[in-house]
Image (tube, rainbow, N blue to C red):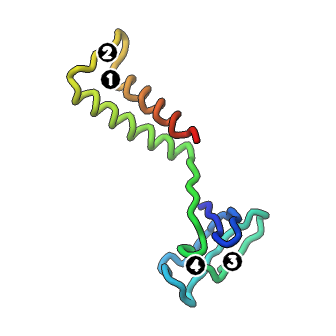
Amino acid sequence: MKAKIRKTGEIVDVICYNHYATIRSHQDYVSYIDSKGIEHDRESLNYYWDFESIETATDEHWQDVRERAAISAMQGMLANSRIYLKEGDTFPNLAVRYADALIEELKKK
């Protein structure tokens, strides 16, 4: 998972950490690969204090968002008795089009 080291701002790929140590202790460690490809094994750092999580949106993530958005759109349309479909449209394909439009807007930053 990608994370940023708070002190340096460097983006690294965290391999593992002691997820039980949420406060500073002698058991703190984080293993990661830095931006130059150098492995750092069991560095004396606390993941929760010394790193910021960075979300990386994958295609799988956007597919999940698409499915949930389409389901929500479909529920909304079926709950609204005033929705009129154009010829050739169905609730499912309209729901997917709404979901795709939502994702397109969400990807803009």
The quarter of the image holding the C terminus is top right
Mark earlier in primary sequence (2, 4): 4
Task: Between label 2 and label 1, give the one nearer the viewer.
Answer: 2
Looking at the picture, which amino acid does disc 4 mark?
Asn
The answer to the question of whether label 2 and label 1 lie on touching residues, with beta carbons closer than 8 A, is yes
Residue carrying label 4: 46
Q: Which mark is residue 91?
A: 1
On the image, the x and y values in percent for residue 66 come to 44, 37
Please tell me whether mark 4 or mark 1 is closer to you in this view: 4
**In-image side of 12 versus 62 (left or right):** right
- Name the residue carrying label 3: 41
- Please identify the quarter of the rendering in which residue 79 is found: top left
Q: Is residue 11 above or below residue 47?
A: above
Relative image position of residue 27 (x, y in whole percent): 56, 87
Q: Residue furthest top?
A: 87
**Residue type beneath disc 2:** Leu
Q: Amino acid at mark 3?
A: Asp
Q: Are marks 3 and 1 in contact (CB under 8 Å)?
A: no
- Vertically, is 99 above or below 11? above
Circle 2 — which element?
loop
Judge left or right: residue 84 versus residue 60.
left
x, y percentage for residue 98?
42, 28
